[in-house]
Image (cartoon, rainbow, N blue to C red):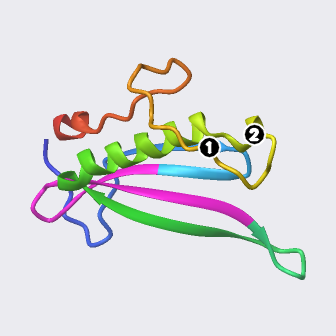
Amino acid sequence: MEFNDHQDREEIYSKPVRAGKRTYFFDVKSTKGEDLYLTITESKKRFREDGTFFYEKHKIFLYKEDFEKFSEGLNEAVEFILANNRSSNNSPNSFAYSEPNDAPNDSWSNVEFEDLDKV
């Protein structure tokens, strides 16, 4: 597979995910050396005082050497949130910390980035 060598780094794969008032874009792009990397963009519609709108965007770049650590950190943070959701506590300002459970959780998917190298 040949990759385009454009200054703007043409997208090889894109997956938009609409989540409430936000849209997340998971875009796979290629470096000049043909290494693939991932950009994650959060986009949210905002309104100006005159009623016109614009999209506020925040972007992070994630390179293949960081996939494993990023995935581990994301999974741990999600597990913490699921185990310590404030709505299940009596006090809105208290967290009862518990270690993440290593058992599989059927309510969400494990993030795996290894398949990006096969694109």
Q: Nearer the viewer, residue 63 or 77?
A: 77
Residue that numbered label 1 is attached to:
96
Residue 20 percent coordinates (x, y): 72, 45
The residue most toward the right is 50
Indicate left or right for 19 with 57 as reference. right
Residue 77 percent coordinates (x, y): 47, 46
Residue at the spot 46% in from the left edge and 66% down from the top edge: 59
Residue that numbered label 2 is attached to:
89
Label 1, label 2: how far apart the Cα atoms are: 8 Å
> Would you place residue 11 above or below residue 1 in this image?
below
Q: Nearer the viewer, residue 24 or 105?
A: 105
Amino acid on which the number 1 mark rests in the picture: Ala
Amino acid on which the number 2 mark rests in the picture: Asn
Task: Specify the segment rendered in magenta.
Answer: 26-45
> Would you place residue 75 above or below residue 58 in this image?
above
- Res. 96 image quadrant: top right
Indicate left or right for 54 with 115 as reference. right
- Res. 87 image quadrant: top right
Residue at the spot 55% in from the left edge and 51% down from the top edge: 24
